[in-house]
Image: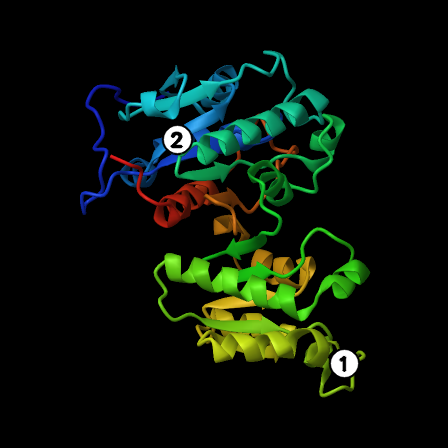
Amino acid sequence: MNAAPTTAPVEQTDTTGRPLPIIAVTMGDGAGIGPEVIVPALLHADTVRRCRPVVIGDAERLRQAAAILGITCEIVSVDSPAEATPAPGRIHVIDLGLLPADLPWGRLSAVAGDAAYQYVRVAAELALRGEVQGICTAPLNKEALHAGGHPYPGHTELLASLTGVEEVSMMLSTPRVKVIHVTTHIGLIDAVNKIEPGLVERTVRRGHEAMVRAGVPDPVIGVCGINPHAGENGLFGYGEEEEKIVPALEILRADGIDAVGPLPADTAFFLASRGDYDLIVAMYHDQGHGPVKVMGIEAGVNLTVGLPVIRTSVDHGTAFDIAGTGRAEAGSMVEALRQAAEMSTSPAR
């Protein structure tokens, strides 16, 4: 067993004296690997140094995960984030108690799907009340979410609904490349139809704001085309680039945003990975997700941009095939917590 001390309190400010942001960590689908990546990630020295995490989930499921991992830690139930007093080896949880003790690992469950929704709902309410400064989500299973009575495409749309925001963007971040999506969870034909200059412009602006907030004051943003070779001057497609993308870029450049494109998507990600671009704008889901997952899924982070609070997530799924085995890697959750802390505002003193 890996024992962790539980005595000395942890500093509640960073090295600059800034109060550590309180991050709500939603447990995701309890039948997946969420609990197994949360426990080691919250005990990680980098997490403890950067934020005050509070799990929204089920305390007993976290204890089961800790036992599977061979980690000895103190899992403490609290009624509010403010009650979470940091200490080495201690994990705080707002315990909703929604899962049966004998919930099987790695199996689709409507009960777990509904619980995953409730964790996010509570986290959103805490954020809107200012009790937490960021949200970091463990993965949920869309089929289980739907079976539990909540027909959302995923976290992005769910959080937008819960916080009353009409439009948000999905951003994926890895050590080699960052990408924001103009469209996400819709079919390819629908995506092409949905893309229009206003949506492209708003997406680029959200990406620009996120990069500035993350410490890049003048980001260079590469904007992908829709067709192969970005249309090849009208050779491919029906002029979608000129109609749907170019007008947005002209407005953005006039406002001083360094947006370059439309770029051929088959080379844009390579150029970004070598440092030519700080952010790539993908027009549809697979255009952005495919390259990102090839270049860095293990350390990938999913961000929702445009919410009233920062939201980050691991860039992997519930991994039912290894859930409950102790084989899940927590690196992406550690990175998601790091970025949530980095991009969150300081709490009120």
Residue name at image x 22 percent, y 38 percent = 13
Q: Which mark is residue 131?
A: 2
In the image, residue 285 above or below residue 331 = below
Q: CA distance from mark 1 to mark 2?
A: 48 Å
Task: Look at the numbered discs 1 and 2 and tell me whether their residues touch, using CB distance below 8 Å.
Answer: no
x, y percent for residue 210: 45, 58
Query: Which residue type does callout 1 highlight?
Result: Gly
Name the residue: 75% across, 60% down.
191
**Total tally of numbered discs in the picture:** 2
Question: Residue drawn at (74%, 32%), measured in percent from left and top?
Answer: 146
Residue type at numbered disc 2: Glu
12 lies above or below 169: above
- Quarter of the image for residue 175 reads bottom left
Q: Kindly identify which residue carries mark 1.
A: 239
Please indicate whether residue 6 sits to the left or right of residue 201 in the image: left
Question: Where's residue 104, x and y in %?
Answer: 65, 19
Query: Considering the image in quadrants, where does the N terminus appear?
Result: top left
Q: In the rendered view, how is the structure colored?
A: rainbow
Name the side, left or right, on which 28 lies relative to 239: left
In this view of the protein, which residue sits in the foreground, 283 or 270? 283
Q: Secondary structure at mark 2?
A: loop
> In the displayed structure, would residue 167 be above or below residue 129?
below
Q: Label for residue 39? A: none
Residue 321 in view (yes/no): yes
Q: Secondary structure at mark 1?
A: loop
Q: Earlier in the sequence, mark 1 or mark 2?
A: 2
Q: Position of residue 141 (x, y in %)?
A: 66, 35
Is 312 on the left or on the right of 290, as rendered? left
- Name the residue at 68% across, 61% down: 284
Q: Could you tell me residue 197's position as x and y percent?
A: 65, 70
| Front-lying residue, 41 or 181 | 181
Location of residue 337 by image quarter: top left
